[in-house]
Image: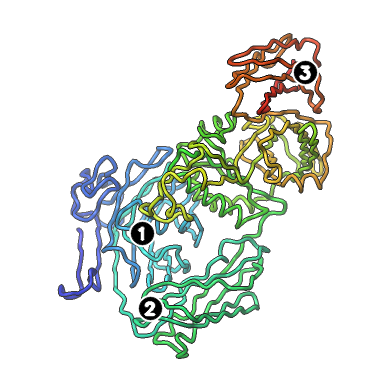
Amino acid sequence: MIKTILLTTLVVCSALLRSQSFNDDFESYTAGNMLAATSSTWETWSGPNGGADDIAVSNTNAHSGSQSVYFSSTAASGGPYDIVLPFPGELNTGQFNFDMWMYINPSAGAYFNWQESSTIGTAWSADIYFLSGGVAQFTSGGALLLECSFPEGEWFKLGMHCNLSTNNWEVLINDISQGFYANGSTQIASMDIFPLQGNQFYIDDVSYTYEAYTPTANNGATTAINNMSSGLAGQTVTPQVTIRNLGNQAITSFDVSLTYDGTTLNETISGVNIASLAFYSVDFTQSLALSPTPSYAVATTSNINGIGSDDDSTDDIKTLLLSPIVPASGKMVVGEEGTGTWCPWCVRGTVFMEELSTRYEGFYAGIAVHNADPMAVDAYDSAMGALIGGYPSGFVDRGIEYDPSQFEIPFLERIQITPKTLITNGASYDASAQTLSISASTTFSESVTGDYRIAMVITEDGLSGTTSDWAQSNAYAGGGNGTMGGFESLPNPVPASQMTYNHVARTISPSFNGLPNAFATAMGIGNTSVHNFILNVPSNWNLDNIHIITMVIAPDGTIDNAQSTTLAEATANGFVAGANVLATTEVASPDASLTLYPVPAHEQLMVKVQLKNTTDITVRIISYDGRIIAERTYNQLSNAQVFPIATEALAAGMYSVQVITAESSTARSFIKE
């Protein structure tokens, strides 16, 4: 049955009743009937009365009685089921206790989220993942806040008990506490159950209780310790502590301290005016190094308005157990996202890619692979586009597909995995010839066999343009879809003059999948192999803003390890010539399209160029070590041109064709057999 119990008088002055409860054991429905279509409470994402995303009540497996609801999905994008349970309004104070029985099939998993606004789809307050293998992850805004185990293949009780006033969230499994955390958002409005691909799970006996909060006169509560929970061991962080005015009187001054790993930091705040129920964040002026051993951070708010003790001392202290992840030695993780200026939701990728690159500098290499805009690199774009289900979307170390807002979770998993390879980037640049020579020296830290591959990507920061195709579509304009790193304050589209693009992929060599069999069939511990990449740099690249990202791709297609360096860093390492040399100048150009056929080449190679403007053109054949073998210049050509090149006399190996116009340089590699 469904019960909604009102525990207080019906005569109230506020929009919400002071105490409410709800439970549903699904026994009042007819098995096989659609839940939202027959319920007065449950809804679907598409509307209150259900639609294509509605789900039938099941009598296959139940915790109590004979009925429950079963969710599963085989779709890459999840669904189609998308069931919503509204809570009693937009709640941001008071005690909210949620309980639900779940049965998750072994090796299947489950997912649901809590929405922040009554208008669903505006903002996600929390995302909860139950992963194959019995691990549950509680996240907010892409940040992992708590992880615990759960039993697979049996019914278990999930509890999420939240003091929304003080931002204190507790997770319980079978009524046993799994820990507390401070959530990224302190407001909830509904639960959304949306099965992801591979999920198979039942829910039963869903219930919640809500008790409203009554402010006292003077009460300052410590609600969050920020900037510390997501770092890696050894990283330096600058703490931030958030307090909330849970009293009726405005807060004009207070003291706050933070103690961690034997060090105490203090701040005195005055001249503020924090209204009742408002939040205020204190950025500490000193930094701390994260300890590799688990340690508590303790933040304390005191001396509210100079009165010493306030009306409620129980909420003055916030304690956070920090267990920073210790990264594997030499490990760097690669995040590749598909994006485009035309894509209104892709600003989400812009924000989170920048956050991860800043937060995990030296451990994370972000690559923005653009689609159908002036920054697109055809080879990279087509490979990504064939693999992802939409934009923005991508991969962390070429694992499963994620929205870029969720990259942090797989990053934290991958950064702990000891790589089999260690990579050193070296470089030299010939300014007169505009030739960049890159070396990737790969040393194996354990013995391996199989088809290990190598690929190199150049990214550039600070790109901008003036034409309309450089303007960024922006679904977050106006704030109707929530906050997103400041884009909610920008128009749709964001004018080109206000946009700067970072982490932009400029070239990938030799291909998305890397050079096949780049290393010996068997590599032993300590074995080193060197690959060289020779590029003719377009004049519109800013070499001060590029990153050289080399990656070793394991036989299963995942990235074993990577290295990202600036040109200055790589030049300081020095260019190393290697026996295993790969020459390529696959640099995309917006001014000319270059096609080679047949490849591999034997006696003759046809070079087809599609020119946008009338221009002089130079065609070069370049060897693996960067030497110009042949060169010819043609005057004032336009449209499509085809040049036959005799290749019979060339030795077998890899070469590249470079086409130079007055405005650009474009190249493609080919193999002579």
In contact (CB < 8 Å): disc 1 and disc 3 = no
Say which of 243 and 440 sits in front. Answer: 243
Indicate the quadrant where residue 647 lies: top right
What is the number of the mark on residue 116? Answer: 1
Residue 148's place in the image compared with 457, above or below, is below
- For the N terminus, the quadrant is bottom left
The kind of secondary structure element at disc 1 is loop
What residue appears at the point 81 percent right and 46 percent down from the top-left corner? 573
Q: Amino acid at mark 1?
A: Glu
Identify the residue under disc 2: 246
Q: Earlier in the sequence, mark 1 or mark 3?
A: 1
Q: Amino acid at mark 2?
A: Leu
Q: Earlier in the sequence, mark 2 or mark 3?
A: 2
The kind of secondary structure element at disc 3 is strand
What residue appears at the point 29 percent right and 59 percent down from the top-left corner? 206
Task: Please give left or right for residue 190 compared with residue 107 in the image.
Answer: left
Identify the residue under disc 3: 631
